[in-house]
Amino acid sequence: MMELLIWGGAVVSLVGLAGLVWSIVKVNRARRANLSDEELRLAVQKVLPLNLGALFLSVIGLMLVILGIFLG
């Protein structure tokens, strides 16, 4: 049972990490597009919810892994 918690947490954490990488890629593409300051600010604001959601998933996943190790 605890192995399932550990592996499930690892999967959730990896999904969060992929979301973080994707948000970095999107902001980097916007920076390379030579946008104006206002357009770049809007692009970053669009990516912010994805970034925060991915960070949340990573933290929850790591908490599940730690909980599984602690209880196992």
Image (tube, rainbow, N blue to C red):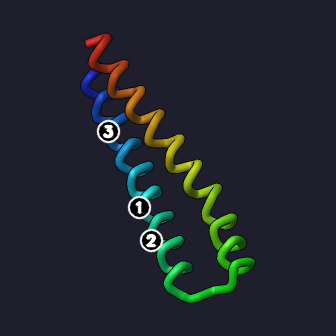
Marks 1 and 2, how far apart in space?
6 Å
Q: Amino acid at mark 2?
A: Val
What residue sits 50% from the left and 64% below the top?
Answer: 23
Residue where numbered disc 2 is placed: 25
Kindly indicate the quadrant of the structure image that contains residue 12. Answer: top left
Residue furthest top as drawn: 71
Q: Amino acid at mark 3?
A: Ala
Residue furthest right as drawn: 38
- Closer-to-camera residue (46/70): 46
Asked if the residue at tag 2 contacts the one at tag 1, i.e. Cβ–Cβ closer than 8 Å, the answer is yes
- Pointer 2 local density, CA inside 10 Å: few below 14, some 14–19, many at least 20: few
What residue sits 45% from the left and 56% below the top?
Answer: 20
| Image position, residue 31 (x, y; %) | 53, 79
Marks 1 and 3, how far apart in space?
16 Å
Q: Secondary structure under badge 1? A: helix
Residue where numbered disc 3 is placed: 10
| Image position, residue 8 (x, y; %) | 35, 36
Marks 3 and 2, how far apart in space?
22 Å
What residue sits 39% from the left and 51% below the top?
Answer: 17
Q: Secondary structure under badge 3? A: helix
- Pointer 3 local density, CA inside 10 Å: few below 14, some 14–19, many at least 20: many
| Image position, residue 2 (x, y; %) | 29, 20
- Pointer 1 local density, CA inside 10 Å: few below 14, some 14–19, many at least 20: few
- Closer-to-camera residue (63/71): 63
Q: Quadrant of the C terminus?
A: top left
Asked if the residue at tag 3 contacts the one at tag 1, i.e. Cβ–Cβ closer than 8 Å, the answer is no
Q: Amino acid at mark 1?
A: Val
Above or below: residue 14 compared with residue 34 = above
Residue where numbered disc 1 is placed: 21
Above or below: residue 4 compared with residue 41 = above
